Amino acid sequence: EGNYFVTSSSNEHITMMFIFLLVHIFQLLPGAVDSLSVPAATIDRQGFIARCAAGMVSYVGTPFPALADDADVGVAALLDARTIFWDGPSWPSCRYATSTLLSSNNNNQSNSPPPSKPAYYPDWLEGYWTISYKFVGATFPQGRRILSLRTAGAGLGTCLSLPNVGYNPPAAHALHFEKSNNANGGKVYEDLAYNVPRRFEAFWPQAKVLAVQTNGSMKEDGSSKMLSAKCFVTGDGCSSDMNPNLHSPASRIAIDFEGPTRRGGRLTQSSDVTMLGYTTKNAGSTSDYYYTEITYSQYNINQDLQTFYKEIRSLRRLDNDAGITGNIRVAAFLPRYIKEIDATVSGNGDDYNENEAVAIYDYKVFMEGIDVMEAARI
């Protein structure tokens, strides 16, 4: 129960998805019920939200080493901050051109906001890994009255960093970081075409990714808006000959997926995510700690739903190749223009800050190194 994707902007669907999200969160709290069998009709929305929020524990991150400079402190501090602010581009410049996106083949350069350069990572992340997740909690810095189902993470698949907030995937999934090939020795980057579909299906087991495309390019100084050809789950369009840049450094990714709907049956849907900007920092004398801060704009095409969020990630390399521990924190934002069209929220929204997070989700992660053959078996 609870694994349903918002297939309409109607009040009924939005309210139900928010209830399902909070049920997921409540289920993971101490003393929570063992099943999701509470009939939706018996739930008072405001009372249930209050009950869940009252049970939330404050997020406490793992200890961090002495940081190299003041700039590093800013990135690491976001993992423990009570609130987080948007420092990305202005909201109008972050939006997708929805009218063209809906009528395009997802390969139109004008659809997305301008992508940033791809993010790069330390050399010790190169290779294949398994990653497991543990939900820590969710907080609402501006209060529960601001919450909306148009917020990233409130509906299934509305935040590709955490496609099902509150859910603990029962099994680890494979992860791949590749090293680019150039005369300067290359840089390590995340293989989005490999990682995003696996993360999506791990968090939403009832869904199936059907196709993926990226704006991958071997140019390390920037990214085009242009997406690659589609790589299908059947293997069509996925070879290096037909799709040479699919697994190259990228800052935009689009997926087609099939998932269950609340009305029954399954529906093929599409999501498109653009990286707007990022900061990466080493910390500690041995550089065994690494932090990233990335801002995203996402468009769920079938629902005409745009979401905005910031992902903060810390990674710590353990001694003796014992793996990597870390934290993932996602801050969801609700621009005023989106909140004003959300009929489920009363009031005009003048008393909230659109540049401050309305929800923050925290997970702990653990990664173990594997080889390519082991990754293929997962």
Image: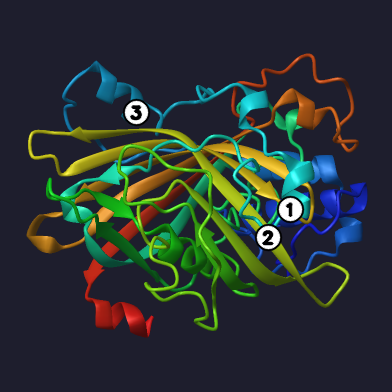
- Mark 3 residue element: helix
Crowding near the residue tagged with mark 2, few <14, some 14–19, many ≥20 C-alpha atoms within 10 Å: many
Residue 262 pos. (x, y %) = 83, 67
Lower sequence index among marks 1 and 3: 3
C-alpha gap between disc 2 and disc 1: 6 Å
Amino acid type at mark 3: Val
Q: Position of residue 2 (x, y in %)?
A: 73, 65
- Residue under numbered circle 2: 270
Measure the alpha-carbon separation of dots 1 and 3: 32 Å
Q: Is residue 2 visible?
A: no
Q: Is residue 10 left or right of residue 292?
A: right
Above or below 195: residue 46: above
What amino acid type is highlighted by mark number 2? Ser
* Contact between labelled residues 1 and 2, with CB atoms less than 8 Å apart: yes
Q: In the image, what residue occupies the spot 47% across and 52% down? A: 215
- Please, what is the three-letter code of the amino acid marked with disc 1? Ile
The residue tagged 1 is: 301
Asked if the residues shown at circle 1 and circle 3 are in contact, with their CB atoms under 8 angstroms apart, the answer is no
Picture layout, residue 275 above or below residue 214? above
Q: Is 69 left or right of 136, judged from the image as shown?
A: left
Q: Quadrant of residue 151?
A: top right
- The single residue placed furthest to the front in the displayed view is 241
Residue at the spot x=18%, y=50% of the render?
Answer: 186
- Circle 3: is it few (<14), some (14-19), or many (20+) Cα within 10 Å? some
Q: Which mark is residue 75?
A: 3
